[in-house]
Image (cartoon, grey):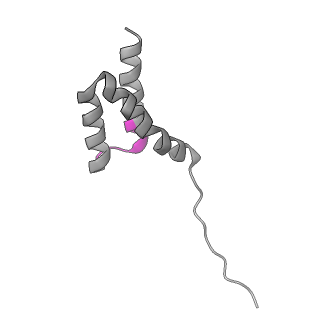
Amino acid sequence: MNKPQINVPEINMELVRIKAALPVKLAELSRINKDAAITILQDWGEGVKPLKVLYKEVLAELDAVTSI
């Protein structure tokens, strides 16, 4: 008797890493630029932007502060 095949979706490891790093980076940003951190956090919570876009925004904000 044949067992039914189970389709398991592929895990996007980049998104896993981003989802793990985003809270840490947001906490770091909140110490430097509270307004930017809150805006990004609201966008994340409301689901208005994809995770990759939010992460790039956090990194850009952190880079802008550290490059001064």
Q: Would you say residue 50 sits in the magenta stretch? A: yes
| Quadrant in which the N terminus is drawn | bottom right
Residue 40 or 33: which is nearer the viewer?
33
Please report the residue visible at 67 percent of the width from the left and 82 percent of the height from the top.
4
**Up/down of 65 relative to 3, above or below:** above
Work out which residue is located at the far top of the displayed protein and give it. 68
Q: Would you say residue 34 sits in the magenta stretch? A: no
Work out which residue is located at the far bottom of the displayed protein and give it. 1
Q: Position of residue 66 (x, y in %)?
A: 41, 14
Q: How many marks?
A: 0
**Up/down of 65 relative to 35, above or below:** above
Please report the residue visible at 42 percent of the width from the left and 32 percent of the height from the top.
25
Please report the residue visible at 51 percent of the width from the left and 46 percent of the height from the top.
15
| Quadrant in which the C terminus is drawn | top left
Work out which residue is located at the far right of the displayed protein and give it. 1
Chain part drawn in magenta: 48-54
Q: In the rendered image, which quarter is residue 37 located in? A: top left
Please report the residue visible at 36 percent of the width from the left and 16 percent of the height from the top.
65
Q: Position of residue 5 (x, y in %)?
A: 66, 77
**Up/down of 12 relative to 37, above or below:** below
Q: Position of residue 45 (x, y in %)?
A: 29, 48
Horizontal placement of 18 versus 68: left or right? right
Residue 27 or 47: which is nearer the viewer?
27
